[in-house]
Amino acid sequence: MPELKASQLLTNVAKTAALTKTKHVTVAATAVGLVLAAVVAASAGPWDASGQRKAEAIRAASPEPRGGAHHGRRGPSAPEAAPSAPAVLAAPGASVPGPTKSALADVLDPLLKDAALGKDRSAAVVDAVTGKRLYGRSAGDPHTPASTIKLATAVAALTAAGPDHRIATRTALEKDSRELLLVGGGDPTLTARTKNPYGAADLRDLADDTAAALKKDHLTEVTLTYDTSLYAGPALHPIGPNENLAQVSALMTDEARLDDSASGPAARAADPAAAAAHTFAELLHERGIRTKGDPGPSKASGQAEDLAKVESPPLSDLVERMLTHSDNDIAEALARQTAIAAHTRADFDGAGAAVKKQLKKLGLPLTGTRFADGSGLDRTDKVSADLLTGLLAKAADPDRPQLRPVLTGLPVAGFTGTLSSRYADPADASGTGLVRAKTGTLTGVNTLAGTVVDADGRLLVFAFMTDGAPAPQAAQAGLDRLASSVANCGCR
């Protein structure tokens, strides 16, 4: 671990640990837990290319209202354990006086005027305990959110489908024609790799079970087709071909990546469903099942008999991974899962409408919002800083434990996901290990929204949005400095 980062972490540990000598023991334990988790994660080394061990180490030290670890599975879902009591993180520092509006403005106003942030800026800071806004600058104005829109996608999906929902990929047999259908359920994390990257549903398991079922019926040759009818509309994102996102299909393996990467930009299969079906045909051949010709598109009839299925990790895990790594493929899948749960057409427009409908049910501020996609790649997306802080405050509500993955999935400053390489500048390093936030970046657009425990032990949620920034790195540093200043602020 770099000496500067280690030193800063020890300083942050000392600051938060000092709170345990006062009446703020509850929130101090939370803050210290996050910092110590960051130390453990940094020294443990990556679990794999995606840094999974680091994410798990920090999640393990974070308050966790859900059950134990979840993994991809075959066949029917086993009953999930009931959620445990609401997490401490939901209401830390309840006995601690919150920052005053004037003191917080004295700290943040000068930083928000930084020219590096561009011509349009919007900001909000909200007390997670009371839900009251403590700071706002154009907080209700809609701006292009970039990837911070994934917070809305996450909350909507968790509300509509539930944190324990799993996405099934199955096979079905038309017995009369011996047509075997590979039916997509919308799981972009379904894996065909020899090494399962993170407990994903495994296409090899599906091939094992399907081949066994066919042989039981004395079938060793079938016509393989694939069914992607769960999704509707165009598969290509409105921005066109992009290495940050595969075509949105109800059937794909490993996000249609053509390399061994688990996150970030990558070349993608031109037809994700066809590529998955060809791989499945090869797996069936290895298991003694011949397939006629090349797999083609089809749709299962009402008489098709289900043979086997595999299921994704629970939606709560997918949300965490989406937020930590800003995974666009998972985001678009979760937006469509929201549409499916709401019995709405599962295309870009239907998913956007379903997300907005779910957020309206929660009473969130939606004036001027537009959800053109679930990932934030579309510049016509519009949300406000008020909405982003509202989403985070809902996730911290002790009465909504099903939304807690929104908080536990946030990257940790200086260590995980899209914040792993940030907070290195001594000017904003005081936020290392303490700030947890979702990033958003498009050309000229930079956003940051997340949680922080301030110097008095109060849990705050924040959102900073900018547009027209001349240089992305300078804008990101400015946003990081704003969040770090909230972490350092007693502001009373």
Image: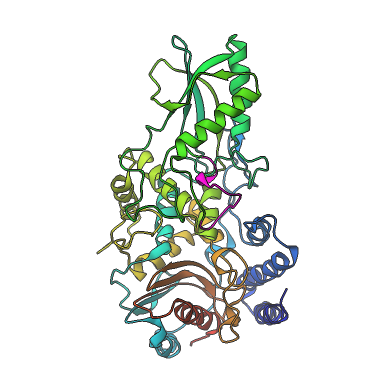
Q: Nearer the viewer, residue 31 or 95?
A: 31
Magenta stretch, main secondary structure, is: loop
Relative to 359, 426 lies left or right: right
Horizontal and vertical percent position of residue 229: 37, 32
Q: Nearer the viewer, residue 447 or 116?
A: 116
Is any part of residue 76 visible from this angle?
Answer: no
Q: Nearer the viewer, residue 398 or 441?
A: 441
Residue 370, placed above or below residue 79: below
Horizontal and vertical percent position of residue 242: 42, 55
Residue at image coords 62%, 42%: 71
Horizontal and vertical percent position of residue 138: 30, 77
Q: What are the residue bounds of the magenta stretch? A: 253-265
Residue 315, placed above or below residue 427: above
Relative to 395, 67 lies left or right: right
Residue at image coords 33%, 67%: 144
Residue 4, placed above or below residue 350: below
Q: Would residue 459 be counted in the magenta stretch? A: no
Q: Would residue 256 be counted in the magenta stretch? A: yes
Residue at image coords 40%, 44%: 248
Q: Nearer the viewer, residue 47 or 314?
A: 47
Is any part of residue 158 visible from this angle?
Answer: yes
